[in-house]
Image (cartoon, rainbow, N blue to C red):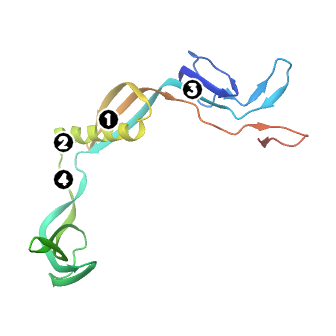
Amino acid sequence: AVITSVSVFDGMLMHIIGDHVNEGTVLVSGTVKSSSEHISMHHANGSIKGIYVDLATFRCKYRPKRYVPTGRTKTINSLKLFSLDIPLSFDGDKFSTYETENVEKPLVIFGKKLPIALRTEKFIETSLSEIQLTDDEIEKKLIEKIYLYEKNFTDDVRIINRKIAVHRTETDVTYSVSYCLEGEIGIQKEIYAQKNGEKDSPL
C-alpha cells in the first residue's frame, strides 16, 4: 500500500505519508526508544490509511442448477386458535423438495378481530433442474454479485476505481474485478520482548 494519512495515539510511527509498505510491515511500534536510549513498551495505537489494490472474482454458469416448480401442488387448511393450529384438511404427504405459500385470514365479527384465523398452506413441488441463462441474465447476476460484495466488504473503504476483465468459457462467464481502494491498512498484533534470559514472551 501507499500511506495516505497517519494518526498515532500511542507508540512510535515507523513510516510516513507517501511511503510504500508491504504486508507485514510494522507501521506503529510499541517499542519506543527515548533520546537517552531508554526503551519503554507501549500499547501501539493509531490509524494508518493507504491506497492498495484488491482483486475479487465472480462466476456464473450458462446452465446453473436450480430448484424449479414441477406444477404439482398440495394444500393444508387449518384453524388457528391463539398459537394452536388445528388441521382441517390435508392433501397427502408433503413433497421431498418444495416451496410454501401461506395465507392467513382472521375472523372478524362486528369489525373486531378474533384470536381465530383460517390458514391455508400451499406446498409447491420443486425439482433440481438445469436452466439456460441468456447473456443479459448472466450479466445481471454478475453485476448483482459485485454490488453485494461491495456493500458487504467495502463499506468502510473508498473505492477509487474498479476495472472488470471478462473471461468466457464453454460453461461459464467470469468477471475479475481489480479494485483500487483507500482505507485502513493497519491491524494490531502482539509484540514480543526478551527478558531475564528467557525466551521471547508476549507483553
Question: Crowding near pointer 3: few (<14 within 10 Å), some, many (20+)?
Answer: many
Q: Toward which corner of the image does residue 94 lie, by quadrant?
A: bottom left
Which percent across, then down, holds residue 62? 23, 45
Q: Toward which corner of the image does residue 106 lie, by quadrant?
A: bottom left
Task: Give the labeled residue for mark 1.
Answer: 175
Task: Give the labeled residue for mark 3.
Answer: 48
Question: Crowding near pointer 2: few (<14 within 10 Å), some, many (20+)?
Answer: few
Q: Tell me the distance, in whole angstroms, between the alpha carbons under discs 1 and 2.
A: 14 Å
Question: Crowding near pointer 4: few (<14 within 10 Å), some, many (20+)?
Answer: some
Which percent across, then down, holds residue 12? 70, 24
Q: Residue at x 30, y 33 (%)?
A: 167
Secondary structure type for disc 3: strand
From the viewer's perspective, tell me whether residue 185 is left or right of residue 104. right
Q: Residue at x 14, y 75 (%)?
A: 74
From the viewer's perspective, tell me whether residue 106 is left or right of residue 8. left
Disc nearest the viewer among 2 and 4 = 2
Disc nearest the viewer among 2 and 3 = 3
Sequence-wise, the earlier of marks 2 and 4 is 4
Q: Is residue 169 visible?
A: no
Three-letter amino acid code at the position of disc 3: Ile
Task: Give the labeled residue for mark 2.
Answer: 137
Task: Give the labeled residue for mark 4.
Answer: 131
Three-letter amino acid code at the position of disc 1: Tyr
Marks 1 and 3: in contact by CB < 8 Å?
Answer: no
